[in-house]
Image (cartoon, grey):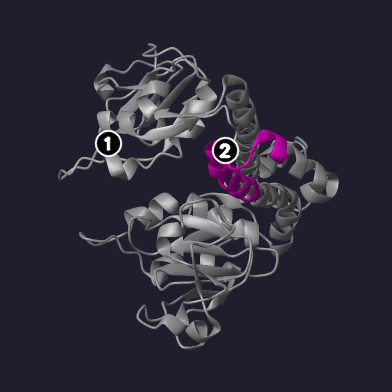
Amino acid sequence: MAGEWAEMPLGDVITLQRGFDLPSQNRKPGKVPIVSSSGVSDHHSEVGVKGPGVVTGRYGTIGQVFFIKEDYWPLNTTLWVKDFHGNDPHFASYLLRTVDFQSCSDKSSVPGVNRNDLHRIPVLLPPLAEQKAIAAVLGALDDKIELNRRMNATLEAMARALFQSWFVDFDPVRAKLDGRPPAALDPATAALFPDSFQDSTLGHIPKGWEVGKIQDCCVQIQNGGTPRRNESRFWDGGNIPWLASGEVRQSIITTTESFITEVGLAESSAKWVPPFSTVVALYGATAGQVSFTSSRLTTNQAVCALVPKKGFAFFNYLTMRGATAGLENKAVGSAQQNISKGIVEETQVVLPPTTLVEQFGEVANPLFEHWISNLHQSRTLATLRDTLLPKLLSGELSMAGLESKLEAAS
């Protein structure tokens, strides 16, 4: 560890202050981020604290730390850094991530972080120049992760906009009906769309298209299963990804939180789901939520997997994403929301010709490939950041040592 590092109470490095009340009825439209214990949750017209700032949860989500670059408003469920005592704010945000918040949680029915206890926790503080260097390394990783997140939001928006134009608003058909060439379509793709509409049970749809069910677009729709929890041979050392319904919340599934063994798969009703399938959570807090699989995995019984027909993978996913609200409205049960596999299978859909669906897949494929690649890269970067963070903040790994490792790896 560097000799110039000093051990001192956290309160000598930063001073934490409770956030401010701001009921929803008092909020005014603006661009100032409102920061709750789970991050930016809304915006307001007035500034509560000048940025850059650091915020963490006081009640609710405890232990997460947010570095806010601009002016912001910290809510009363948070603690914000009122005084950095001359230290680097960005470094302070990483330092706080190494603190044991649970040791400072009040022993009450609603656990919360005790600010005074936090202030007494001993931490190691490097000189300012090294603070900035550490923050620059970790910040570069976080900046790339954030860039990937924003890029993926754009890629998803592009895919959904194209799907909306072709299969919901029927823009190419309307253009041809008006005697105009469809916008941004090559002649071969434009020729796949008709130039008129017909009546159907779902209203006006393009001539020659049909009304069907999502199961018409799938090889099969299946539920999974859960190996017995009390059988360690089903879980210990497993390398088969196993998806629980609570994980069906992000757009694309690139990894799972749990893994089962070959024996667990063989002796349960869990089944393999191929990549590029659509999965729907059937019950629990995520009931009705839809995700897309980027690789082969298995699921529990509360997840319904739509294995697509050839060329229908992206069509199925975006169709079911559009049906999410309808699925959630059909959920039943008071203690636990519940959607049946039958409800998923019966989801109505306007069915274009297979050639057109396959052409949509060809156009959407580069968007999804880039999206998935960014997710994998961000996961790798997050793992690297989380590995470096405690080593750099404890002085176990110096900046000089990190630089030599990077040079050796290059």
Q: Residue at x 37, y 11 (%)?
A: 46
From the top left corner, tell me how far across and down residue 178 is, in percent.
70, 35
355 in relation to 19, above or below: below
Disc 2 + disc 1, Cβ < 8 Å = no
Q: Is residue 253 magenta?
A: no
Label whose residue precedes the other's in the sequence (2 or 1) = 1
Mark 2 → mark 1, Cα distance in angstroms = 27 Å
Magenta stretch: give its range: 379-402
Q: Residue 37 occupies which quadrant of the picture? A: top left
Mark 1 secondary-structure assignment: loop
From the top left corner, tell me how far across and down residue 73 is, in percent.
37, 19
Q: Residue at x 63, y 63 (%)?
A: 276
388 in relation to 216, above or below: above
Residue 188 appears left or right of 351? right
Q: Taking the image as drawn, is residue 135 in sight?
A: yes
Q: Quadrant of the C terminus?
A: top right
Q: Residues within 10 Å of mark 1 (few under 14, many from 20)?
A: many
| Mark drawn on residue 219 | none
